[in-house]
Image: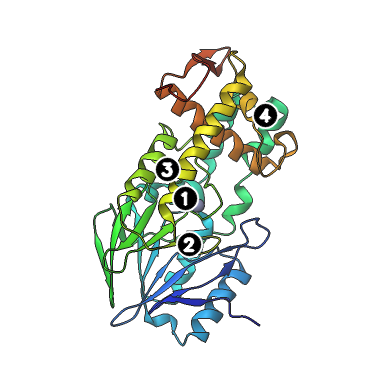
Amino acid sequence: MAKPYKEILPGIHQLQVPIPNNPLGYVLPYLIEGDDGYILVDSGWDAPAAYGALMAQLHALGVPLKELRKVIFTHVHPDHYGLAGRLKGDCDAELMLGAPERGFIDSRYRRPEGLLDRMQQWLTSHGAPASEVEGLRSASMPVRGYVSPADPDTLLHGGEEIKSGRYTWEVIWTPGHSPGHMCFYDRGKKIMITGDHILPTISPNVSLHPEATGNPLHEYITSLRKIRDYDVEIALPAHEYDFIDLDARIQELEEHHTERMEEMLGGMNGQPKTAYEVAGHVKWVTGDFASFHPWMKRAAIGETLAHLEHMVMEGIVERIFEDGKQWYKPMQRTVRRSS
Ligand SMILES: [Zn+2]
């Protein structure tokens, strides 16, 4: 049987940890050799198959757990951070996480009750019908079972340097997919660990939700452009596979979001609509909005909102509050500026 892991570059092992019952299939943690131990970037979520796969690969590489010096999480989503508590119990590695992610550990994984209440109001105000609100609001609760939370020992802010053997990783703050998402760059070898910020074919979810207000799509696009300024020969993402033409991928992702805004604007047909209504007009690659599983449906509403809010900032649509709901009204017919 083919090994699930491979040595991408000397001392950098790309592991593969399954995410059972999830279309993403697996997460790719990176095990990096240092002078006195190893660094692990991302962990997989806390399911027996995932933990077992991670342990088996470390064992096959001859790396005892006690030699893990640092476990760095690109962000706090379950498939990246899920094994934090379990690893902390197994070894004495220093856990590192982007500072803006810190607050989500309690609100999502330890005490989600307040979040559930806010979620209910939020879904109603964005047009979800009463008959669906209950299912939608608790849709991500099962995922909590895949997270063993632990507090980070070190909070990352971007700009730090993390040394591991022949590599020196510059921490780059890339908010958008998650507010405290971090990428890691080795300037000498021109390697970028991109986490979920940039994947080779999947467009990462960029969403608004009750805890992420503001304009995450603007942050995401700004973070894409930030990465374009780095000279990268190989990109190491957290899903799919490693790839080389990062600039072209950045271009595609920006274009994808412009097209999606255009599609939403078209679906609004000049009329004020709620995010729920607009989401129903989008051709989602994963299927039809009306028949989505509640978890997917909520992600689609959040993603739609991220685009609508970005269009508010650009003056393309206007936000209106009426009848206890939030509506978006088109102010122009196209997203693209004619030049
Ligand atoms: Zn993620």
Q: Which mark is residue 176?
A: 3
Amino acid type of the residue that numbered disc 2 sits on in the rendered structure = Phe
Q: Are marks 2 and 1 in contact (CB under 8 Å)?
A: yes
x, y (%) of residue 153?
Answer: 32, 63
x, y (%) of residue 300?
Answer: 60, 37
First in sequence: mark 1 vs mark 4: 1
User: How many angstroms separate mark 2 from mark 4 (CA)?
Assistant: 33 Å
First in sequence: mark 2 vs mark 3: 3
x, y (%) of residue 155?
Answer: 30, 56
**For the residue carrying disc 1, how many other residues have a C-alpha within 10 Å: few (<14), some (14-19), or many (20+)?**
some
User: How many angstroms separate mark 3 from mark 1 (CA)?
Assistant: 16 Å
* SS type, badge 2: loop
Residue farthest right in this picture: 291
At horizontal 44% and vertical 28% (from top left) the residue drawn is 310
Residue 135 image-quadrant placement: top right
Q: Which residue is mark 1?
A: 249
At horizontal 50% and vertical 31% (from top left) the residue drawn is 307
Q: Which residue is mark 2?
A: 243
| The CB of the residue at mark 4 lies under 8 Å from ligand 1 | no
User: How many angstroms separate mark 2 from mark 1 (CA)?
Assistant: 9 Å
Image quarter where the N terminus lies is bottom right
Q: Are marks 4 and 3 in contact (CB under 8 Å)?
A: no
Q: Which residue is mark 4?
A: 280
User: How many angstroms separate mark 1 from mark 4 (CA)?
Assistant: 27 Å
Q: Is residue 316 above or below residue 283?
A: above
